Structures are given as C-alpha cells and as structure tokens.
C-alpha cells in the first residue's frame, strides 16, 4: 500500500472577506474530491482572505497510481481561473515507511 499527499498553496483573486474566500474555496475542494475520489481539505491560511492551502491525500496499491492521481489534482488546481497555484509540495510513502 502506498500513501500520498499533496499540499497546494493558492493565491485567490478578488477576495475581500472570509465569506468570499469560502465561496471560492468550497467549489474547488468539492470538484477535486468529486472528480478524483480523494480526501481534500483546506489545511492552512484559514484566516487569510487571499491565501489558502489545499491538502489532497490518497492511498493506492501501487506508487504509479498515487503519482498519477496527485498529478491530476495538481493540474486541476492549476487550471482553476479564480486561483493562482503558487507552490506545491508532495510526499509519497510505502505503508511500512510510516
């Protein structure tokens, strides 16, 4: 079993309140979750209006599948016009390395 996660730091567009931020972040999180069937959450910058970090995680039987899904998640986040992907960090481990 392989475990992988991706942290994506995003800069939001014209957002001036936490309420506006939620209206941008929630659909992004929901789309990644729905399209890839992975765990997704806002994981950092919770009180900042124009920044957020989205975490994506999954388990799979082989490393190639984890790499493939995380690649798709990164491309999906980068393709959203309402956010700018600033940086990503990724980690993949075998279950016995944890």
Image (cartoon, rainbow, N blue to C red):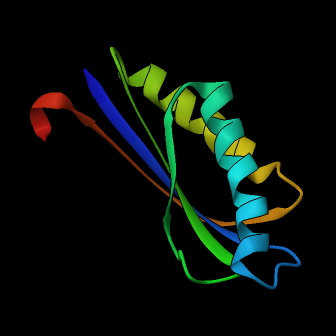
From the viewer's perspective, is residue 2 above or below residue 78? Answer: above
From the viewer's perspective, is residue 96 above or below residue 29? Answer: above
Q: Nearer the viewer, residue 33 or 66?
A: 33
Residue at point 75%, 48% (across, down): 27
Residue 49 seen in the current view = yes
**x, y (%) of residue 47?**
56, 82
From the viewer's perspective, is residue 97 above or below residue 52? Answer: above
Left or right: residue 14 compared with residue 54: right
Residue at point 67%, 40% (across, down): 30
In which quarter of the view is residue 64 placed?
A: top left
**x, y (%) of residue 88?**
55, 59
Q: Which of 97 and 14 is in front in this view?
A: 14
Position of the C terminus by quadrant: top left
Residue at point 60%, 34% (across, down): 33
Position of the N terminus by quadrant: top left
Residue 50 seen in the current view = no
**x, y (%) of residue 48?**
61, 84
Left or right: residue 2 compared with residue 55: left
Q: Which of 90 and 30 is in front in this view?
A: 30
Q: Nearer the viewer, residue 79 or 82?
A: 82
In which quarter of the view is residue 81 placed?
A: bottom right
Residue with the most extreme top position: 61
Left or right: residue 81 compared with residue 27: right
**x, y (%) of residue 38?**
50, 31
Residue at point 47%, 20% (across, down): 65
């Amino acid at each position: 079993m392989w475990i992988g996660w991706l942290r994506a730091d995003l800069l939001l567009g014209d957002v001036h309140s936490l309420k506006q931020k939620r209206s941008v972040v929630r659909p992004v999180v929901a789309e990644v979750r729905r399209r890839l069937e992975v765990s997704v959450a806002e994981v950092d910058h919770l009180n900042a209006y124009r920044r957020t970090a989205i975490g994506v995680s999954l388990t799979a039987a082989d490393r190639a599948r984890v790499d493939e899904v995380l690649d798709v998640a990164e491309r999906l986040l980068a393709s959203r016009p309402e956010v700018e992907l600033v940086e990503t960090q990724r980690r993949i481990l075998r279950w016995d390395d944890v």
